[in-house]
């Protein structure tokens, strides 16, 4: 298992959809691992599979099959919301809860240290947005001195549980830490009574998690640097935990009301801010969306959407991991040691240049065609799963070595291009046994200004027989797209014969560019 901390990561909490029969925690953890991450954030709660049902955090960690499955995956770091299962009522910081808080976090810490000794894994135990707990979800509420003291007692009890368990449990090469999450840091900087300025200095937790939506407007990188500096200043040094102790536990934006490129741009800026500052983690919210509007629309806090489409921000993360792991391997080979956090952070800034944050694959130049011969997906903005490149029988396809085709499913699949001002296109496809399927044309084209609202484009077909029952079908718009599009979607439909249709080449044109 690779235990180097690559800092950048994501999480899976409350996902509103899934694509397999596995427990949703397991499915999303696999997706996070496949993207390249070595860090998993989730809520440690029973997943509904255990018999008998667990009654404590330790029983959940030890006995819930889904939780055990993700702990066995090769993640180096686990960041978890933990709330004891056996607590009485009375509010989150009620004195009657403290005994149970102490016992359950103590037992959980001992279990993790014992079960995963020697693995190199690290576990971070904490809470959801603490300022909402303190202010009763009201940004205008001023907590009383007694309420602040109750939260101090609560956080101190939880830290003591972890400290005592670490002291009492023999362990090797495994770590458990406690963190407090804050989310109204700008309020604290303005002098309001909040967790950052009233609780952290009195508790000094191992780490602080910053749910950072209040720093995402304006100059993002400057805002984050100020907020992270402020939080770090509330902490006293702690033996055995060197370096910065504040991490970005949540950031992100919904696609609803924004664009996929804005999501990627924000992520690029926040990653840069965290890496430059030295944050232990920078965690995007999240792999699958968790918020749905009352009328059933996904808000779009996602890396993979509810149709299985990987978003630009997903590819930003994936490319980061590829570059990060190559850098660490090369650095280690040359220096016979791994890079420090500071060395890694500075090197990583070069992989996140600001000008590429709103990346448009294949930007159009006025009057010039954009051509994708489809040797790979490097010029494609995004695409669904189950699309591959077929290289068999090029003689049937006029010598084209590769074509895009569905694989493993007879359901519609698509890929998307992005380039402002798309007015025309010429798409070379190949169909077996005719271009018409039972549900209409085997390839359909859609245009959009924002990648959210799509409009079908009427096409003209030019069909030429090739070999062995195959035909080349060239698609062009029946007329110019009425409002030049920023996005063009190519959807492969077909029938049960998933090898047809295939797409061999895509050309895109701006207004006035001749189609050749």
Image (cartoon, rainbow, N blue to C red):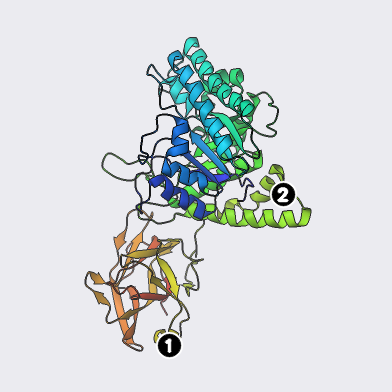
Secondary structure at badge 1 equals helix
Q: Residue furthest left?
A: 438
- Asked whether, in this view, residue 255 is left or right of residue 202, the answer is left
Q: Is residue 98 visible?
A: yes
x and y percentages locating residue 212 in the rendered image:
51, 34
- Name the residue located 50 percent from the left edge and 36 percent from the top edge: 80
Which residue corresponds to mark 2?
338
Disc 1 crowd, CA 10 A, few/some/many (<14, 14-19, 20+): few
- Name the residue located 55 percent from the left edge and 36 percent from the top edge: 112
* In the image, residue 29 above or below residue 506: above
Q: Please name whichever residue, 97 or 126, is drawn nearer the observer in this view of the structure.
A: 97
CB within 8 Å, label 1 to label 2: no
x and y percentages locating residue 378 in the rendered image:
51, 66
- Name the residue located 60 percent from the left edge and 30 percent from the top edge: 207
Q: Please name whichever residue, 2 or 341, is drawn nearer the observer in this view of the structure.
A: 2
* In the image, residue 414 above or below residue 58: below
Secondary structure at badge 2 equals loop
Of badges 1 and 2, nearer the viewer stands: 2
Which residue corresponds to mark 1?
395
x and y percentages locating residue 11 in the rendered image:
48, 43
């Amino acid at each position: 298992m690779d235990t180097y901390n690559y800092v950048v990561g994501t999480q899976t909490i409350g996902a509103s959809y899934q694509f397999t029969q596995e427990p949703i925690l397991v499915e999303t953890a696999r997706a996070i691992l496949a993207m390249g991450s070595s860090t998993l954030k989730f809520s440690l709660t029973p997943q509904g599979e255990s018999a008998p049902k667990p009654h404590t955090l330790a029983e959940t960690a030890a006995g819930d099959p889904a939780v055990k499955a993700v702990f066995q995956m090769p993640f180096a770091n686990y960041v978890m919301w933990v709330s004891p299962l056996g607590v009485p009522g009375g509010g989150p910081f009620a004195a009657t809860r403290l005994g149970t808080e102490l016992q359950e976090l103590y037992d959980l810490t001992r279990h993790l240290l014992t079960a995963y000794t020697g693995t190199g894994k690290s576990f971070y135990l904490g809470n959801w947005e603490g300022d909402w707990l303190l202010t009763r979800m009201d940004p205008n509420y001023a907590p009383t001195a007694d309420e602040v003291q109750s939260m101090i007692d609560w956080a101190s009890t939880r830290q003591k549980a972890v400290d005592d368990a670490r002291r009492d449990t023999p362990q090797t090469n495994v770590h458990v830490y406690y963190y407090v999450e804050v989310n109204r840091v700008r309020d604290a900087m303005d002098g309001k009574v909040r967790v950052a300025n009233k609780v952290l200095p009195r508790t000094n937790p191992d780490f602080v998690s910053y749910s950072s939506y209040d720093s995402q407007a304006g100059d993002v990188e400057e805002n984050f640097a100020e907020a992270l500096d402020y939080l770090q200043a509330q902490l006293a040094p702690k033996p055995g935990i060197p370096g910065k102790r504040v991490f970005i536990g949540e950031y992100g934006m919904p696609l609803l009301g924004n664009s996929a490129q804005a999501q990627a741009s924000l992520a690029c800026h926040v990653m840069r801010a965290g890496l430059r500052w030295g944050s232990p983690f920078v965690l995007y919210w999240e792999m699958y969306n968790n918020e749905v509007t009352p009328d059933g629309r996904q808000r779009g806090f996602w890396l993979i959407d509810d149709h299985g489409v990987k978003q630009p921000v997903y590819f930003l993360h994936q490319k980061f991991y590829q570059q990060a792991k190559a850098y660490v391997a090369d650095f280690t080979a040359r220096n016979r040691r791994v890079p420090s956090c500071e060395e890694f952070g500075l090197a990583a800034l070069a992989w996140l240049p600001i000008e590429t944050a709103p990346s448009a694959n294949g930007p159009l130049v006025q009057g010039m065609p954009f051509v994708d011969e489809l040797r790979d997906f490097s010029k494609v903005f995004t695409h669904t799963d189950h699309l591959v490149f077929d290289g068999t029988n090029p003689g049937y396809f006029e010598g084209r070595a590769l074509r895009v085709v569905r694989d493993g499913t007879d359901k519609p699949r698509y890929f998307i291009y992005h380039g402002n001002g798309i007015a025309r296109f010429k798409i070379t496809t190949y169909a077996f046994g005719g271009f018409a399927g039972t549900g209409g044309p085997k390839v359909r084209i859609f245009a959009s200004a924002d990648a959210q609202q799509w409009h079908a484009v009427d096409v003209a077909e030019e069909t030429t027989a090739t070999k062995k029952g195959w035909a080349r079908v060239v698609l062009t718009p029946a007329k110019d797209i009425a409002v030049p599009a920023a996005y063009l979607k190519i959807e492969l439909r077909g029938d049960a014969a998933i090898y047809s249709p295939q797409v061999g080449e895509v050309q895109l044109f701006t207004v006035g560019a001749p189609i050749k």
